[in-house]
Amino acid sequence: MWLFLTRRFRMWVILTVLAPLAVKVLRRLGRTLEQRNGPSAVSNGLLKAGDLGERAQRKLGGKRRR
């Protein structure tokens, strides 16, 4: 089905649905690991990846949800 969608619509879906979802998942994983095991390189990396995703969303014009 993905094949039948236009390129522009696929990009819109990725940027509006999948990217914010990925950011939330990365941050949640980072927080969970940090709570269980304390700060580590993996948890810090996941949190930084989540922060990077948030900065990219803000820079590209996405508004932060409350």
Image: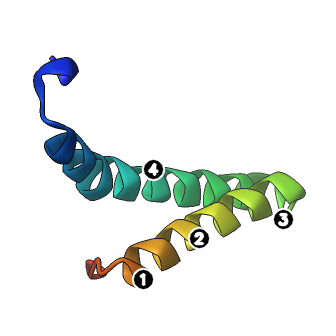
Between 57 and 50, the one lying in front of the other is 57
In the image, what residue type sits under mark 3?
Pro
CA–CA distance in space, label 4 to label 1: 17 Å
Q: Please, is residue 62 above or below residue 27 in the view? A: below
Nearer-N-terminus badge (3/1): 3
- Answer with the quarter of the image where residue 4 lies: top left
What's the mark number on residue 52?
A: 2
Mark 4 vs mark 1, foreground winner is 1
Q: Name the residue under label 3.
A: 39
In the image, what residue type sits under mark 1?
Lys
| Label 3 residue SS | loop
Mark 2 vs mark 1, foreground winner is 1
CA–CA distance in space, label 3 to label 1: 28 Å
Find residue 60 and report its horizontal and vertical position in percent. Answer: 36, 77
In the image, what residue type sits under mark 2?
Leu
In the image, what residue type sits under mark 4?
Ala
What's the mark number on residue 22?
A: 4
**Residue at horizontal 60 percent and vertical 51 percent from the top:** 29
Give the crowd class for mark 1: few <14, some 14-19, many >=20 residues within 10 Å: few
| Label 2 residue SS | helix
Find residue 28 and report its horizontal and vertical position in percent. Answer: 54, 56
CA–CA distance in space, label 2 to label 1: 10 Å
